[in-house]
Amino acid sequence: MERKPKTTTSSNKKKRKTTTSTSSNKKKKRKATTTTPQSTPNPSLSDDLLLRKTTTSTPQSTPNPSLPDDLILLIIARVPILYYPILSMVSKSFRSLLSSPGLYKIRSLLGRMESRLYVCMDIYPLGKGPAWFTLCRKPDRTLSDKEEAMKSSGYALARVPFPHSPLVTNGNLVAVGSDIYNLGTPSNGKASSSSVWILDCTSHTWREAPSLPVELSTVTASVLDQKIYVAGWYKVDDDAPADHSMKNSFTVLDTTKTQQACDLVPIHCSLAQGKLIILSTCIGGKVYLGNWGIMVGYNPVEGSWENVGQAMSQYLLSDCYCEIDDVLYSLASDRVLRWYDPQVRTWSNVMGLVGLPKLPPDDPFVKMANYGGKLVVLWNRPHVSTDMLWCAEIALERRNTCEIWGKVEWYDPMVEVPTLVSINEALSATL
């Protein structure tokens, strides 16, 4: 019995065509669904626009094979900068992304620029250059009963590895934006220097900048409106008598110009010769310079000088002071926190400060810094055969014209070091 071949009817063909077209329509719909843009947290700036604005090339190796580097940058840009030291430990690829200029351009466009605290210190044994640390959050973990009882703040100081860091002296570091300037640091056994080095805090790399006009044997620097005001002693004539061989120099470095400009400014007659400048600070739109008995103010807009008396320098000689929101704060050798009122030219104690540990008087290992509008205080406590660096963060509030109150938000041990030789500087960059 012969089998009859199956014949396909026209109705079957139509059914097949309909099915095929239906499945293709479904695929198209799926495709369309896949390419639908996701909503962005910032409605004014889409992620696509951010990527177009930040055209800097990023590393080719991707930490996560399923995500492109550009997308990872958008995610990391939204993470608080306190967590960046932890992220840098994930992999080499993450470390590379964290030093990408494109990351910090995205942070700027998103309005997520933050202060990042750096601490520079000398640790024994010397010879390998200064040690740099940055404030960070500890990785999340389950606290022990002892740590829970101590109510740890969760902050720590993480070591920042620099392959080659220039030497640092007290008073020669200042921060402008995301850069830290190292000014006039003597090296190779020289007693003076005109060198200028710049630390890029986005990539943690140093670059050399144009030198100062003269070689300085002492340096003190401060910042006003992105201009660095550098003062110090320089040698005029080797053959001149000792009291006439040294003069003070006052230089302005304009960091806003593409080609960094250095301008020498004629100095006030009371400090022009024979009076070593050891102090400098900026408040109220003026630059203040001084020493043990003289303090003068310079108005850069008018190009004029004025005497401000001795009261201002009274609590600055311990070299533990900083400016926050146009107010000058000091921790003098008695370790009492004070603020200076330029209107009446007097110092007053900061009120409150409940819970702040008593700081050791006359201890040279005490520093303070402006950390995003809050005051950070660092001090050392010897710990058996090592040193332990502590840190406190204080929020400041001006309640009326003659009172400023401080609230201690936290304090904790930060890092243990073999032997602390000096805390050169604590300062904040903006990233």
Image (spheres, rainbow, N blue to C red):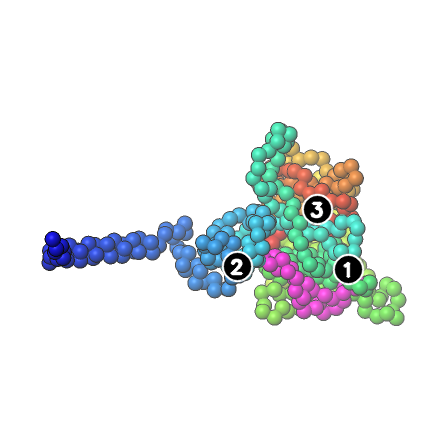
Mark 3–mark 2 CB contact (< 8 Å): no
Identified at 33% across, 54% down, the residue is 34
Q: Earlier in the sequence, mark 1 or mark 3?
A: 1
> Would you call the spot at circle 1 few (<14 residues within 10 Å), some (14-19), or many (20 or more)?
many
Q: Earlier in the sequence, mark 3 or mark 2?
A: 2
How far separated are the C-alphas under marks 1 and 3?
20 Å
Name the amino acid type tagged 2. Ser
* Quadrant of the rendered image containing residue 419: top right
Is 375 situated left or right of 48 in this image? right
* Quadrant of the rendered image containing residue 374: top right
> Would you call the spot at circle 3 few (<14 residues within 10 Å), some (14-19), or many (20 or more)?
many
Q: Which mark is residue 218?
A: 1
Residue placed under numbered mark 2 in the picture: 61
Based on the picture, tell me whether residue 209 belongs to the magenta stretch. yes
As drawn, 413 above or below 146: below
Q: Main secondary structure of the magenta part?
A: loop
- The image position of residue 326, as x and y in percent, is 60, 50
Residue 366 visible: yes
Residue placed under numbered mark 3 in the picture: 367
**Which residues, given as a range, are shown in magenta?**
191-216
Identified at 84% across, 66% down, the residue is 245
Identified at 52% across, 54% down, the residue is 63
How far separated are the C-alphas under marks 2 and 1?
46 Å
Based on the picture, tell me whether residue 146 belongs to the magenta stretch. no
